[in-house]
Amino acid sequence: MDWQRESVRMKDVYGCSTFNISASGAQDGSVGCFFDRDAPAMRKISRSRVPLLHKGRQLSIDIAPSQIYRSFASSPLLGRAWCFQERFISPHTLHFNDTQLFWECQENYACETFPDGSPQPHRRDLLRCGLATTKASSVTDPHSSGLIHSIVEDSEGLDTPLASESPSISGGIDTTRSLSELWSECVRIYSRTKLTRQTDKLIALAGVASWVHQRSSDQYLAGLWRENLETQLLRHAVTTGRDRTAQDNYHLARPVEYLAPSWSWASTNRQIHYTTAYDPATVPNPNLTYSCLIVVINAETDPVTPGDAFGRVKGGRLRIEFPEMRTGYVGLSNRSRERVYLDDPGGQIHGIEVFYLAVLRCCETSNCGGGMCFEEGIVLREVSWEAATFRRIGYYVLDGCGSTIGANVDGRRFNSWNARCLTLI
């Protein structure tokens, strides 16, 4: 009990520090901060920019050696879950890496190669480089540390070429605009770390969650936030592509003990990615129309320790109102526009009826059916039809307007329900 109580206080320990010295390149405590390094590899070099015309906008991209970023992102200490909150909450951090020194703070990220500030492509995984000026500004204050760098910079350059992977970003989400989107990037990074005890998953993040709660006043729900909770359900496990780091046995293994409700990313050990995790109403692109198709009308969790909303949980429920549901069988479709990502690919669900709940739909305003249209939703498995209770088992995305997955659930099956509301556990 003392340990759980003290773990939440880490936000005060690191948040009140002047700066944090991090032996990021050390495999363990016997190594220390200092390494034999290649001096020519860390020489100062100038930033190089290339102009780019992107969707009618004149932008520019920074060009820099990718190994600089990779050496930092792959640092042993950054792979430890308990160190995530140290990096997040500390106002300044000096990282001793095996290649060079790195500096993170609220305003900048620098290294010996780029002492005046890193080029944009090397900032994607940084937690301390600045805030969007819209909704996210309410999460911080001028006397505290920053929260997280925007996913795609909208000032002078384009951070990383995400448009080919993410219809939501290429559709106009150019800055981090809400707590839910800020948090989704934290989840992406945190999910790549490891724990000795898997049941510490929420506890090791408790200091960060408490820190954010103090500045946002939002309700924390087993790793998610109440505001824009609907789109925060649209996570999926990383399977292929450049977002896939070391998919080792740790991240592929099924949790042995209960970690969180199935609707929370914390219920799995998988590395997590979000395509959409924002309020569709904030989308600035007039050429796209976003529609959230469900409403979470009630959300609650059951803390292991009564009154501790940021620690371990033993249960949780979402009450969701929805207009339609579809049903089908995973693995029986060969449609190219239909992609299903299972939370546990090793689970025995082939040949078992599953349910598809559409969460978000995007259409091109002037060209419905164009290349930017898509639908995202979650895959559910029935726990009790009479009690309208389900468990999440995956995520799906459909490309193009008019695309469907499965078949409509016969309306007569809902006759035993009081309303089209389900409980997700």
Image: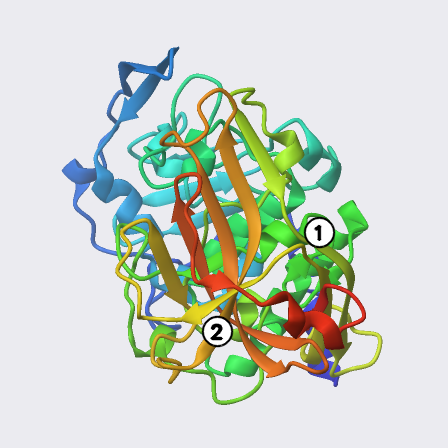
Up-down: is 365 above or below 233? above
Q: Earlier in the sequence, mark 2 or mark 1?
A: 1
Please state the total of marks drawn on the protein image: 2
Structural crowding at the residue carrying mark 2, measured as other residues with C-alpha within 10 Å and reported as few (<14), some (14–19) or many (≥20)? many
Q: Amino acid at mark 1?
A: Val
Q: Which residue appears at 35% of the width and 56% of the height?
A: 339
Q: Nearer the viewer, residue 190 or 282?
A: 282
Q: Which residue appears at 26% of the width and 20% of the height?
A: 46
Up-down: is 166 above or below 406? above
Q: Nearer the viewer, mark 2 or mark 1?
A: 2
Structural crowding at the residue carrying mark 1, measured as other residues with C-alpha within 10 Å and reported as few (<14), some (14–19) or many (≥20)? many
Q: Which residue appears at 61% of the width and 65% of the height?
A: 205
Quarter occupied by the C terminus:
bottom right
Residue 212, labelled with which disc?
Answer: 1
**Residue 200 shows up from this direction:** yes
Residue 354, labelled with which disc?
Answer: 2
User: In the picture provided, is 414 more to the left or to the right than 234?
Assistant: right
Q: Position of residue 283 (x, y in %)?
A: 59, 29
Q: Position of residue 77 (x, y in %)?
A: 40, 63
Under circle 2, the secondary element is strand
Q: Position of residue 398 (x, y in %)?
A: 41, 49
Q: Which residue is situated farthest in the right direction here? A: 307
